[in-house]
Image (spheres, rainbow, N blue to C red):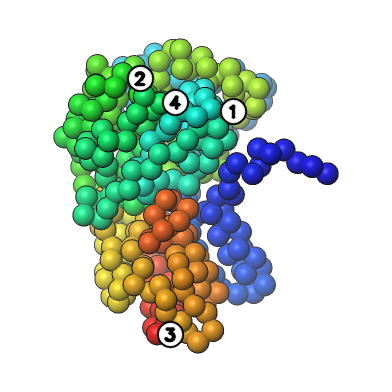
Amino acid sequence: MELSSLLNRFNEPETLKMAKLGRELRASGIDVIDLSLGEPDFDTPQHVKDAAIKAINDNWSHYTPVPGFLDLREAVCTKLFRDNDLDYKPEHIVTSTGAKQSLANTILALVDEDDEVIIPTPYWVTYSELVKIARGKVVEIRTTVGNKFKATPEQVEAAITPRTKVFMFSSPCNPSGAVYSKAELEALVEVFRKHPQVIIISDEIYEYINFVNKHESIAQFADIKDRVVVINGLSKGFAMTGWRLGYTASTAAIAKACEKIQGQFTSGTCSITQKAAIAALTGDLRPSQEMTEEFTRRRKRTLELVSEIPGFKCFEPEGAFYVFPDVSSYYGKSNGVDVIKNASDLSMYLLNTAHVSSVMGDAFGEPNCVRFSFANSMENIERAWKRIAAALALLK
């Protein structure tokens, strides 16, 4: 059987691959501590679950409109105005089965063959692969720890060409935890003003998990708002990963294009999830705030533990729930059996020796780093880093 050449254009997400390997080891009886997946280890807030139960009892069990129920899209608009001072109408909103589908809809709606998409590194693993699926060209901007893993206006200006179609980034960033301030966004906007052909995709899925400032959206700058597609969803901020609800806010034209694409893939997302999402978006945010307070405590402890690892150089994350240390000082070292040549080798070594799962930085466009999540209990975080330290001490 000969499969489609499409499959050769992109790679399996390393985040899912590492989680799968961890599950396989766990199934064989090994105690694996998971620091690989980007999933809050909290339960969905009770008022959201209650709304879902009510929706089931009220028989909201039929097909849904492709872009989502009107009252859900109104709830998204309410949230965007309340939290971000952004004025959108329901016709600007498309809800999907997770922010990943929202990203896919947007890329497929915007990018043609050989169009260039600028993505600052490190970036979420799926960004580059979606561009490849659309036959676009990924143009990476290498950021540094010195710049707090943020693209500078000079870098963006230098990367733009007549073929540039999209600039795509996240704030807070997965995997680095970088958060762009209003002043930093305004400096980027100054560049985009000179290049009206560039559409900005702003992934804001970690909006509520912010340790430094109020979240700032690049869509707040009125003169470029029509060129911004905001991506968001419920997975991270509301601990609703399995519910699968993401959304885009954009111009009506881009929204219609996303709706057309989604109509041939999945149609509308789950009816029960949509009703629960209304409760999440318009209801009590205290559970989300309490979750971020706990992540703040875990971040502090994780940074203390990382600082005790010889050779790790770590940026202090400003948002999300990951640390992303430079681990290159271990390249070339060996325990007598395994030789660490790169981040992938180090991640696999830690999985097989320390029984701690992580994700190699190559997947995020940053080959000298490894991503470790602190979306796990404090007890497991302590245990994991003790194991990591012991395993790394064997490398000479």
Of 339 and 86, which appears nearest the observer?
A: 339
- Rendering quarter of residue 329: bottom left
Residue 278 visible to the viewer: no
State which tag comes first along the sequence, 2 or 3.
2
The vertical placement of 379 against 273, above or below, is below
- Rendering quarter of residue 308: bottom left
Of marks 1 and 3, the one in the foreground: 3
Of 376 and 45, which appears nearest the observer?
A: 376
Q: Residue at x 36, y 47 (%)?
A: 121
Q: CA distance from mark 4 to mark 1?
A: 13 Å
* Label 3 element class: loop
The amino acid pointed to by label 1 is: Thr
Label 2 sits on residue: 197
The vertical placement of 142 against 24, above or below, is above
Check contact, mark 1 vs mark 2: CB within 8 A: no
Q: CA distance from mark 1 to mark 2?
A: 31 Å
Rendering coords of residue 368 (x, y %): 38, 61
Label 3 sits on residue: 394
Q: CA distance from mark 4 to mark 2?
A: 20 Å
Q: CA distance from mark 2 to mark 3?
A: 53 Å
State which tag comes first along the sequence, 1 or 3.
1
Q: Is residue 10 left or right of residue 166?
A: right
Q: Residue at x 38, y 61 (%)?
A: 369
Label 4 sits on residue: 248
Of marks 4 and 1, the one in the foreground: 4
Q: Residue at x 49, y 78 (%)?
A: 339
Rendering coords of residue 59 (x, y %): 65, 24
Rendering coords of residue 191 (x, y %): 23, 28
Label 1 sits on residue: 269
* Label 1 element class: loop
